[in-house]
Image (cartoon, rainbow, N blue to C red):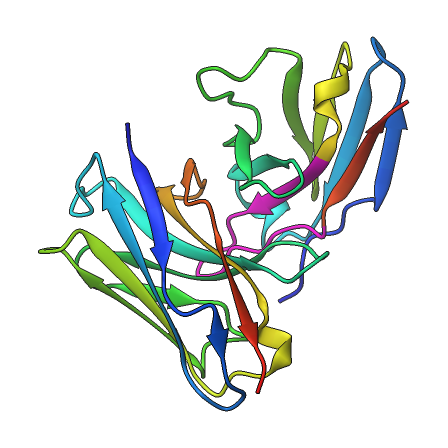
Amino acid sequence: QLQLQESGPGLVKPSETLSLTCTVSGGSISSSSYYWGWIRQPPGKGLEWIGSIYYSGSTYYNPSLKSRVTISVDTSKNQFSLKLSSVTAADTAVYYCARQPQPLRYDYWGQGTLVTVSS
Amino acid sequence: QSALTQPRSVSGSPGQSVTISCTGTSSDVGGYNYVSWYQQHPGKAPKLMIYDVSKRPSGVPDRFSGSKSGNTASLTISGLQAEDEADYYCCSYAGSYTPFGGGTKLTVL
């Protein structure tokens, strides 16, 4: 059974960089059939797609976040990662990682991790 | 680019049917047959209910169905049950961008 698990700091200071890692178990991140995505959900609000990555390193990002987002992949560790720079309180959210069969659906999700931006 | 438009809330009694709409543009919903729907209970991760407009993943009851007409996709839940009470989100392929809808809260009366 495929499982995804987010990890990283739960508290980030304003103007700093948020860094999260998603570890995939029970399957290979190097499968040609899938992208791997990050989605977030501010408290009490809806889902927002952040960006997605292919095992080769090919990425595409939400235009509204593109200038601050970097997603990378480490196939040797079966992990992919998110970096979001210059964070503000508006970036406080539960961050989810998910598997994305092409072209688009999210069929396996991590449990989510709450990241709070506060000094 | 902007989020897809969904009604904020819908409601129905047990056994009834409800339909949730998801309106986009010809650049997303109307341009591709790649709309997916997600169910989210409080404090839980979203769960895929429908993909490619009308396909159901294994294990999803056939009470859940999807369709599309023009720039609007719809999720219909028939034979409502108490456990269907949740938030529902649509999502559409849009080339290099994958917007979600704002979400619809389904209340089972």
Q: Residue furthest left?
A: A76
Q: Quadrant of residue A88?
A: bottom right
User: The magenta stretch spans which residues?
Assistant: B87-102
Q: Residue at x 50, y 91 (%)?
A: A15
Spot the residue most to the bottom.
A15
Residue B101 among magenta residues: yes
Q: How many marks?
A: 0
Q: Position of residue B78 (x, y in %)?
A: 75, 13
Instruction: Considering the whole magenta stretch, tell me its main secondary structure.
Output: loop
Q: Residue at x 61, y 52 (%)?
A: B100
Side of A38 where A119 appears, left or right = right
Image-quadrant location for residue B85: top right
Q: Is residue B51 above or below residue A54?
A: above
Q: Position of residue A18 (x, y in %)?
A: 42, 76
Provide residue B36's location: percent of width, then percent of height.
Answer: 55, 37
Q: Is residue A74 shown in magenta?
A: no
The residue nearer to you, when weighing A44 against B90, is: A44
Q: Residue shown at 68%/38% (left/top)?
A: B88
Above or below residue A88? Residue B78 is: above
Quadrant placement of the N terminus of chain B? bottom right
Q: Quadrant of the C terminus of chain B?
A: top right
Q: How far from the left and from the top, in percent, is residue B105?
A: 79, 39
